[in-house]
Image (cartoon, rainbow, N blue to C red):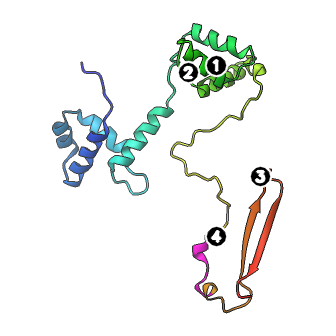
């Protein structure tokens, strides 16, 4: 029995082309030497969300994001984790641990993985976090989410400004700008009456 293999980006482009030529799912599966259920599942899972069309680039990005967000087993054995813990107990940062373990040829582990390990240990009642000089806040992964950083709720876009404002013929049209300081505590507000 053949082991299942994920569709490649090239295969997804072929599916897109064949869908445009109105091939059925069964015909696409035969042409690609794939199971009809594989094609059916691909079309069901990875259509573009706003209009329901299948596009290869979008489908591939959806599949890649889904695959990377799934929980996977640890790639490191208990001996390697003991080495990480020993370095942490010397008050080394995860970045220093990562670099040292790689240089010594013990394992190639990222500092993000070590931070996750510490957070999971803390949730389980462990005390590795106490050896940290600084423990950063847990960051959320932003897969398939609209980026909302720097967006003010209820703020109208400048393109919605009435056309007569650009003529600068009526008094009472104001333009404002805000400059926020480095420490995020102080700001300067500039208001200009556009006609004068």
Q: Nearer the viewer, residue 109 or 7?
A: 109
Q: CA distance from mark 4 to mark 2?
A: 45 Å
Residue linked to disc 1: 97
Res. 99 image quadrant:
top right
Crowdedness near tag 4: few (<14), some (14–19) or many (≥20) residues, C-alpha within 10 Å: few
Mark 3: which secondary structure? loop
Residue under pointer 3: 182
In the current view of this chain or complex, which residue is farthest to the top?
79
Left or right, residue 107 beside residue 89: left
The residue nearer to you, when weighing 101 against 163, is 101
Left or right: residue 77 versus residue 177 is left
Q: Dot 2 corresponds to which residue?
A: 109
Look at the image and give the residue range highlighted in magenta: 157-164
Contact between marks 1 and 2 (CB within 8 A): the answer is yes
Q: Which is in the foreground here, disc 4 or disc 2?
A: 2
- The structure residue drawn at horizontal position 23% and vertical position 32%, both measured from the top left corner, is 35
Q: Is residue 120 visible?
A: no
Q: Residue 68: where, in percent of width, then height? A: 47, 33
Above-or-below relation of 89 to 195: above
User: In 3D space, how far apart are the residues under numbered discs 2 and 3 (Cα atoms)?
Assistant: 34 Å
Which residue position holds label 4? 156
Disc nearer the start of the sequence (2/3):
2
Q: Is residue 134 left or right of residue 30?
A: right
Image quadrant where one finds the N terminus? top left
Q: Residue at x 60, y 21 (%)?
A: 98
Dot 2: element? loop
Which type of secondary structure does the marked residue at label 4 adopt? loop
Q: Closer to the camera, 96 or 193?
A: 96
Q: Is residue 27 visible?
A: yes
Within 10 angstroms of label 2, few (less than 14), some, or many (20 or more) residues? many
């Amino acid at each position: 029995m053949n082991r299942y293999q994920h569709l490649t980006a090239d295969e997804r482009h072929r599916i897109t082309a064949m869908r445009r030529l109105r091939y059925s799912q069964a015909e696409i599966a035969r042409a690609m030497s794939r199971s009809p259920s594989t094609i059916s599942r691909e079309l069901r899972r990875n259509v573009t969300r706003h209009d329901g069309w299948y596009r290869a680039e979008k489908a591939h990005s959806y599949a890649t994001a889904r695959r990377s967000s799934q929980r996977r087993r640890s790639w490191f054995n208990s001996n390697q984790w003991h080495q990480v813990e020993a370095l942490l107990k010397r008050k080394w940062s995860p970045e220093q641990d990562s670099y040292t373990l790689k240089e010594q040829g013990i394992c190639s582990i990222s500092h993000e993985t070590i931070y996750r390990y510490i957070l999971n240990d803390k949730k389980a009642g462990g005390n590795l976090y106490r050896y940290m000089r600084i423990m950063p806040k847990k960051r959320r992964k932003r897969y398939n989410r609209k980026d909302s950083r720097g967006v003010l709720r209820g703020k109208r876009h400048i393109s919605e400004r009435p056309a007569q404002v650009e003529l600068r013929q009526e008094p009472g049209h104001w333009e404002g700008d805000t400059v926020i300081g480095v420490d995020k505590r102080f700001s300067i507000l500039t208001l200009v009456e556009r006609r004068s």
